[in-house]
Amino acid sequence: MRVIVHTGKGGVGKTSVSAATALRCAEQGLKTIVISTDTAHSLGDSLEAEIGPEPTQIRDNLWAQEVDARYSMDKYWGRIQQYMTSLFTRQGVEDIVAEEVTILPGLEEGAHLLWINQYFTENKYDVLVVDAAPTAETLRLLSLPDVTRWWFEKIMSITRGAARILRPIGKVLGRTSDSIPADDAWNQVDQLFETLDKVRRLLTDPEVASVRLVVNPERMVIKETQRTYTYLNLYGYAVDSIICNRVIPDEVTDPYFEMWKRNQRDNIAYIREAFGELPMFTAPMFSQEITGLEGLRRLGTALYTDRHPEKKQFDGTTHQIREVNGIYTLSVPLPFADKEDLDLYRSRDELTLRVGPYRRNIVLPYSLWDLEIEDAKFEHAALNITFARVGK
């Protein structure tokens, strides 16, 4: 099964692009499901169909689903959350507040994508298209912070040990052990982390999954998408294309749009600078809202022409960040470049590379902002830039 994840800034048209991509795959004979993991669901509106938390068939080879966060939470977190809620409640915390504080940070959003594991395991579909939440939060939260995992594993080991003692004592005293978690509740936690790890491995395998960044040709949107792309590289997710949506067509000659068209041309050129060799698909701004199968079919045709959207669109990497013992190395492939033609400029959160007449702009992740460039070497057809703390 191929997994295609669309993400980007809110309002750029991810849902329409996801629905159009899924429809095109289905009409090419592939069993396809498109799911929305955005809490502000609009996938049903885009398809002009009633869909819910379970897959709904829209037409031949096409299913759609708006993932319900509460259902996912109950499925993967229910037993242990009940225990922790009762524990907090006995300490005088209100029930509703207790329920909220027992959700690990990021778990509610991350639980959306646990469906990927189910569909991959069942192998019922050829293509899974994911309409992800704005930016890459949902993807990044799949790999829960190491501190959170460490904290929870410590709590689990302590409470598990206490439960082994308290459960038989409770039976002797004639008290119920409902508030003491059974081993299968802890097993549910182990399974949760195991499943999250498995989904992350799937999404970081370019032979299985592709992340596609949806942008509009607007400078603010592009800057946020650059930052998202850099974080995706940092976490190892495979981005294989940029989808530039709502480009004003050349046939629009009204003088009112002339300045917009000029700005869009400049921004499209900037997208090519920012994302290197990543292929870019473009779709025009249509004269009416894109909804329903006919409208989505037009969008899919404009985006992909004669190409197959389920195929991997890019094999290489445009840049990669590695971390070893607090020292980060940014590697930028520059085949056929001469190091004598290289120039490097750095502000706190950006790098600009010049190679002869060409320029490349890279937004740095937050973790590199306060680090200094320790070294920059051109080797193995790549520029490798090392960041470290001053004096390290």
Image (tube, rainbow, N blue to C red):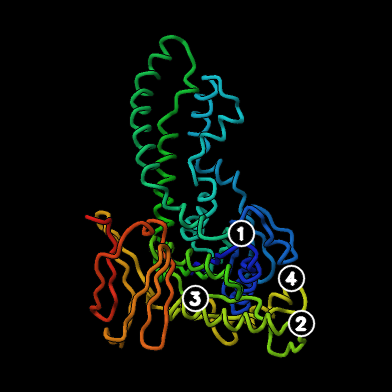
Are circles 3 and 1 on residues that touch, CB within 8 Å? no
State the separation of the CA atoms marked 1 and 4. Answer: 16 Å
**Mark 2, residue position:** 256
Q: Nearer the viewer, mark 2 or mark 1?
A: 2
Secondary structure under tag 2 reads helix
For this orientation, the residue located farthest to the top is 173
Secondary structure under tag 4 reads loop
Residue at 45% x, 53% y is 142
Are circles 3 and 4 on residues that touch, CB within 8 Å? no
**Mark 4, residue position:** 291
Secondary structure under tag 3 reads strand
- Count numbered badges in the picture: 4
Left/right placement of residue 119 relative to residue 58 reads left
Residue 152: x and y, percent?
39, 37
Are circles 2 and 3 on residues that touch, CB within 8 Å? no
Residue at 47% x, 56% y is 117
Q: Residues within 10 Å of mark 1 (few under 14, many from 20)?
A: many
**Mark 3, residue position:** 241
Are circles 1 and 4 on residues that touch, CB within 8 Å? no
171 and 142: which one is in front? Answer: 142
Residue 70 lies, with reference to residue 221, above or below; the image says: above
State the separation of the CA atoms marked 3 and 4. Answer: 24 Å
Residue at 55% x, 52% y is 112
227 and 79: which one is in front? Answer: 227
What kind of residue is marked 4? Thr
Looking at marks 2 and 3 on the same chain, the residue that comes earlier in the sequence is marked by 3
Looking at marks 3 and 1 on the same chain, the residue that comes earlier in the sequence is marked by 1
Secondary structure under tag 1 reads strand
What kind of residue is marked 2? Tyr
Q: Nearer the viewer, mark 2 or mark 3?
A: 2
